[in-house]
Image: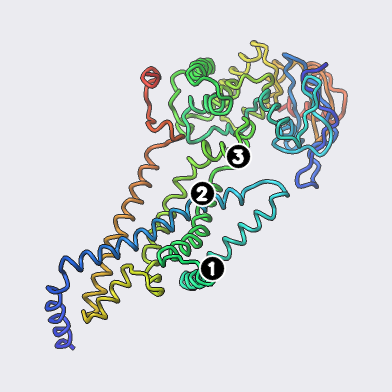
Amino acid sequence: MHHLEVNGLTATYDGKLLVLDDVNIQVGKGEIVSVIGPSGSGKSTLLRVIMGLLRPKSGEVKLDGDTVDYGNKKSVKALRDRFSIVFQQFNLFQNMDALRNVTIAPVKIRKRDARQVEEEAVELLGKVGLGDKLHAYPDELSGGQQQRVAIARALALKPEILLLDEVTSALDPELVNEVLDAIRILASDGMTMMIVSHEMGFVREISTEVIMMDEGKVIEVGSAAQIFDNPQTTRCQDFVGKILRH
Amino acid sequence: MYEGFLDIFDVFLEQAAEFYVWDNAVYLFRAMMTTLFMTIVGCGLGFVFGMILIYLRKTPGLIFLPVRLAMIFYVEIFRRVPFLVLLFLVMFTVKGFGLDYSLFTIACISIVIISTAFIGEIIRGGLDSVHQTQWDTAAAMNFSRLQTLRHVILPQAWKVVLPPAFAFFVMFIKDTALTSQVGILELTQAGKYYNNLGYSAILSFGTVLLLYFVLSYPMTRLGWWIEARLRDRRRDDDDELEIGVTPYELRRT
């Protein structure tokens, strides 16, 4: 049984535009599955649908064999207790400093002990290299720093699976590495992750499995080596060829 | 022309000594307080109902569509009706139902009806100024809609909401003059009263005008002060008022 299983997932925007078309994905515990593909191929939408931010039209998402009912608030809540997502645009709460961004959900939503959460948050922020920025507000932080706070915030919820949605795409090139380093640390800790990324070198280095998507469909699935060195489909060859030449 | 002006001035001086006495001061002060309280109660409740209105207007899903439409309908109607007409309508409806409400209550009800619509729109503008991604992020972390509003959206929306809300409040201080039409003893009515007693219009209405300024100006200043405070300091929550760059060790004690 897989940790996370996506079967025949289909989603539309406004009931018309098909953005996910019969997507099947399996993620095992401790695995790092990366989703690659051109812009508009449905990668980010896939993560949004899994998180319940967009209702799927059909298909199912299973967590440890249990199907998530996206029409049921309780079921979605239970799912969100086990997942964390980090967004492309960081989406830090602008009215809170870094520390508060990390502690608010565990304290106010999960009702955990504030002092303990704060200690953990300080440790997490230290881990992503922001031990000296605890009380800085989002607008006082660089993009890379904000994204690292966002990662710490996601981790403070102790997720079983971490979803990373193009977390380096909005960053200046020189800031990308600091965020990737933070993710590398998570990978070495054995965190299960689904990563949507355009950083091909990074995807290749870190992924246990790579999924190539285009026009809402999964085109090819395989190990990083297979997808990058020996892609089977023409579309994948085309995409990888263009990217690697780039 | 010049002579006429001098005459008026003479009358003014003559009457002024008689007008500015303790009893009249008390009378005017009470009228002023009626004006102020009417506005505070009307706009204060309007703020509360405006929040509720917008909360209902932002309910998700098809099931709440009638609620949303009703809220939109309310706002669109009551932002477009003259206050005086509404005031008469409320007064005669209340009387029609045989209810024995005071004129003050009737005025407050009318102000609430109008201010709910206006302040509701102001609050909506404030909430819309906060990016949708903040809602999504909070939802992904299992915040309920109310928790998202309280912890994330409203603290960011205040600085957009408060200046126009305060401007509306100050503007309504002046608009309550219309309630003199139904006989409420507020500032304008007091002016009429003194004018009818034979005091010159310059004296009676001039004084009233000055008192309106005395009421509104501090309110405007208060609005500026709150605005500046919101700009300088950021708060995320009611239980954490002091936010600055405080060392972690200090904050824990």
The first of marks 3 and 1 along the sequence is 1
Tell me which residue sits at (20%, 65%) in the image: B25
Q: Circle 2 sits on which residue?
A: B126
Q: Earlier in the sequence, mark 2 or mark 1?
A: 1
Classify 10 Å Cα crowding around label 3: few (below 14), some (14-19), many (20 and above).
some
- Name the quadrant containing residue A7: top right
Give the number of the mark in front: 2 or 1: 1
Chain containing mark 3: B
Q: Crowding at label 1, few (<14), some or many (≥20) Cα neighbours within 10 Å?
A: few
Q: Is residue B123 left or right of residue B245?
A: right
Percent of width and height locating residue B48: 49, 50
Left or right: A243 as drawn, with respect to A114: right
Parent chain of label 1: B
Residue at mark 3 = B145
Marks 2 and 3, how far apart at CA: 16 Å
Mark 2 or mark 3: name the one nearer the start of the chain.
Answer: 2
